[in-house]
Image (cartoon, helix red, strand yellow):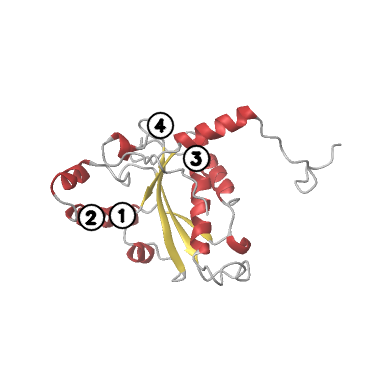
Amino acid sequence: MPAPHDPATSPPPVFDAAFRDRLGALMAWRRDVRRFRSDPVAEAVLRACLDLAVLAPSVGNSQPWRFVRVSDPARRAAVAANFERCNAAAGAGYADERRALYARLKLAGLREAPVHLAVFCDRATEAGHGLGRATMPEMLRYSVAASVHAFWLAARAHGIGVGWVSILEPEPVARLLDVPESWDLVAYLCVGHPQEEHVDPELVRHGWQARSPDAARLHER
């Protein structure tokens, strides 16, 4: 009978050029999705993506991410209404042509996405014993952002789209979802099968903002 797999004693994997190419393609095709089909996401796939999300790095091994699936129709509708109010206010802050362009953008799939995930940072977590965040307490939030990105890549690998909705009021959404006061909203994610596939960002495709040629510039000091 073979010995059970022990990650602590197993040799490290070898990531060859073919894997690196596919990893690059995965990152390039990880897009912010706003247009979703209504068919459900398989529960096993969603759980597999969450299992990978919690492998993200976290300051002091604090693991401060808290995922909340929002299934209640009334709560989902209230989140969508909050977005629509905030989105209208944001659009009003632009002038003339930029305002008209903003109004044409689709910036969330809250009404269509079959899965809503609210991702919180538990700033009261005792895990990690405060290591690494005495001088940079924001590292807790950065850790949650890393878990969101890990989830996003995992979902893309399964053909699932993710949209990160930031045009929301964090505190009202947290109250709406009845979470502990120490939980701060970091991300509200729409998850589902995308209606369309594009390798270029939607905001580039619709003329809002081109990619910066200096985005990957390495500064030397």
Nearer the camera: disc 2 or disc 3: 2
Q: Position of residue 122 (x, y in %)?
A: 50, 66
Q: Rate crowding at label 2 as few (under 14), some (14 to 19) or many (20 or more) other CA atoms within 10 Å.
A: some
Q: Is residue 203 left or right of residue 115?
A: left
Looking at the rendered structure, the kind of residue marked 1 is: Ile
Location of residue 15 by image quarter? top right
Q: Name the residue located 48 percent from the left edge and 61 percent from the top edge.
A: 141
**For numbered disc 3, what is the local secondary structure?**
helix
**Cα–Cα span, label 3 and label 1:** 22 Å
Q: Of 102 and 221, which appears nearest the observer?
A: 221
Q: Is residue 52 left or right of residue 112?
A: right
Say whether residue 22 is left or right of residue 1. left
Image quarter in which the N terminus is found: top right
Which residue is tagged 4? 199
Q: Which mark is residue 90?
A: 2
For marks 3 and 4, the one nearer the N-term is 3
Q: CA distance from mark 2 to mark 3?
A: 29 Å
Does residue 190 lie above or below 122 as drawn? above
Q: Is residue 196 above or below residue 149?
A: above
- Upstream in sequence: badge 2 or badge 3: 2
Looking at the rendered structure, the kind of residue marked 2 is Ala
Q: Nearer the viewer, mark 3 or mark 1?
A: 1
What is the residue that sits farthest to the left in this orientation? Answer: 96
The furthest residue to the front: 221
Disc 1 element: loop
Q: Residue furthest top?
A: 18
Q: Earlier in the sequence, mark 3 or mark 1?
A: 3
Q: In the depicted view, which residue is nearer to us: 125 or 30? A: 30
Q: Which residue is mark 3?
A: 155
Judge whether 194 appears above or below 66 on screen: above
Residue drawn at x 60%, y 50% as measured from the top left: 55
Reading the image, the residue beneath label 1 is 167
